Every structure is written in structure tokens, then in C-alpha cells.
Amino acid sequence: MRTLETDRLTLRGWRDDDLDVLAAINADPEVMRYILDGSVRDREQSAEGLRKMRRDWAENGFGLYAVEVRATGELIGWAGLAVPTFLPEVLPAVEIGWRLSRRSWGHGYATEAAAAALRHGFDEIGLDRVISIRHVRNQRSARVMEKLGLAYEFETVVPGHDQPVAVHAATPQTVSGTATSS
């Protein structure tokens, strides 16, 4: 796995000691408000999520990065690429996604991290299309998607959760943002 760097962030692989921060993010009701049925995750669910993120890297050659603020080394969440198995109607597809701690919202970190992961997906992995999926009421994510160059395509419902979602998509020609990798 490559480490990606932006002006303010480092996107890196997951470490065992990341679980405490990940569990705290997943336990915040406001962070989880628009994720599937809106339920928070407990520590064991977060640990399983961390194991799944590591497996996805091994199986797919891409995945979700841990996102740190470069100036402080603080872990603030994740961003990256995943296969959206929760929405079978869009498959085969690769999704760009992010989840950040609430106190890191409003600083442009989601856009910066997702732009780096998206560019990596297009330039290094060779993807020709990436989607992003958001709850229809999640306007914060809608703004990030717009800044990234993702265009609205359609609305649907997540099976088993009855969650109304909007699907957005981008190609290498429509994205913005750059990143350096090391």
C-alpha cells in the first residue's frame, strides 16, 4: 500500500493502535447519522471494520486509508476506495468514500483526502470510473462530491435498510485535486 500525501494530510495504512480513534468516530451519532440505518458502531463492530479494511487492501489492491493531519499526526478518520457491495445494483463498481471525526468537519479535509485517493485510483490503479453514494439528505457529502467533480446520476434505495441514496460518478477527466505519493 502506498502512502499518499497532500498539503495537510497523510493517507496511510492501518495500525492496530488506530482502533480507539476509529471506535470513537463510529460511536458518534452525528457522524453515523446518514450511514445505512444511522446506528452507531460499538468497539467490536469497529474492530471488525478495521479487519475488513485490511482484508480489502489484500484482496483488491486498493482500499480505505487512515487519514492523519500532517502537522499533528492526529488520526481523523478514513478516505479511499471500496467495492460498494451494500448496493448490488451498481456493481461492478468502485466507490470513493470518507468518514471523518466530527471535530474535523468544515476544514476541507474530506475533499482533500478523497481527491488524493480518487487521483490514485485513476492514475495508479487505472480505474476509468468511480462512483460515490450518499444519503439523499446528506448535503455535506453532496458538496464534497461536487467539489471532486462527481456528477449526480440517480437515486435508489439500499436493500434491507430502506435508505434513500443518491449515486454520483466521475471519470479521470472530471475530477479535481492532486496528490503526491510516496
Image (cartoon, helix red, strand yellow):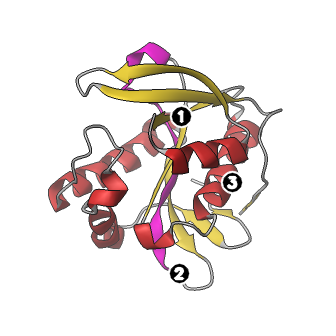
Residue position for label 2: 73
- Residue 29 picture location, percent across and down: 27, 58
Q: CA distance from mark 3 to mark 1?
A: 14 Å
Q: Is residue 66 above or below residue 71?
A: above
Question: Looking at the image, is mark 3 or mark 2 earlier in the sequence?
Answer: 2
In the orientation shown, which residue stands out farthest toward the bottom? Answer: 72
Foreground of the two, 133 or 84: 133
Residue 76 visible to the viewer: yes
Neighbourhood count class around disc 1 (C-alpha, 10 Å): few under 14, some 14–19, many 20 upward: many
Q: CA distance from mark 3 to mark 2?
A: 18 Å
Residue 80 visible to the viewer: no
- Residue 75 picture location, percent across and down: 46, 73
Circle 3: residue type: Ala
Q: Report the residue at 57% width, 42% height from top.
A: 142
Question: Looking at the image, is mark 2 or mark 1 earlier in the sequence?
Answer: 2
- Which quadrant of the figure has residue 50? bottom left
Disc number at residue 95?
Answer: 1
